[in-house]
Image (tube, helix red, strand yellow):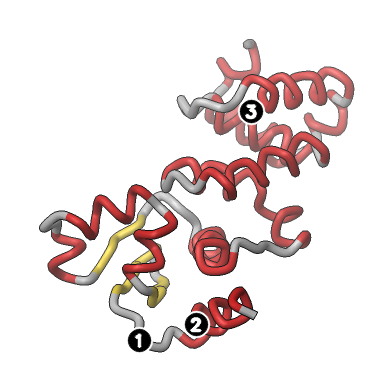
Amino acid sequence: QLINQLENLFENIKYADVTLNVGAQKFQAHKSILASRSKVFAAMFEHPTKEKLSNQVEIEDINPDVFHELLRFVYTARLSSKTMEKMATQLYFAADKYFLDQLKTECEVHLLHHMTPDNCMDLLLLLGNEHQLVDDLKNEAVDFFRLNPVDVMATDGWKKAKKDQPKLLCD
């Protein structure tokens, strides 16, 4: 029942006291919930930062759809399997940024058990962008690539890597 009430609070934004500006989208949230779930938000709202003083947080490096699901997880500790299928890789890195260890672990487990040509290439591309990924996940992506090179090379991620990060493909 508590989870359902928190999900209702998330959906209806009653008593929200902070606006999260993610790209062109604005999300209303509650500082106390954000701070209780994320050390990053806790530090942001604990000290006299511009975010605390203005009740506005600018987030430029996360897709709004991904952030919406991250926020849902912050409130409810739940994600749909459809969400995990669609954006586990992006959620993993967003969870890492905001120190959401439970979400990060759930994404990691999902990716280890549901590697696809698309998320394999997404992981390898993100690794090439200086993100630290756990060894098991990195090894799984590399092994998957070795076993399914034709499928992986047919993805948009492969085309993007050839264009933007050719060195990654040599590694």
Does the CB distance between marks 1 and 2 fall below 8 Å?
A: yes
Badge nearest the viewer, 2 or 3? 2
| Location of residue 24 in the rendering, given as x and y in whole percent from the top left corner | 39, 69
Q: Quadrant of residue 57?
A: bottom left
Going by the image, does 108 lie left or right of 103? right
From the top left corner, tell me how far across and down residue 23 is, in percent: 39, 63
Q: Position of residue 120 (x, y in %)?
A: 73, 33
Q: Residues within 10 Å of mark 3 (few under 14, many from 20)?
A: many
Left or right: where does residue 80 sit relative to residue 47?
Answer: right
For the point 53% across and 24% down, which residue is it?
A: 128
Callout 1: SS: loop
Q: Residue at x 57, y 82 (%)?
A: 5
Give the distance between the C-alpha atoms of the residues marked 3 and 1, in whole angstroms. 41 Å
* Secondary structure under the numbered disc 3 in the rendered image: helix
Question: Disc 3 marks which amino acid?
Answer: Leu
Q: Quadrant of the N terminus?
A: bottom right
Which amino acid type is marked by label 1? Tyr
Q: Does residue 25 sit above or below 112 in this rendering?
A: below
Can residue 116 be seen here? The reply is no
Residue that badge 3 annotates = 124
Number of numbered tags placed on the structure image: 3
Of labels 3 and 1, the one closer to you: 1
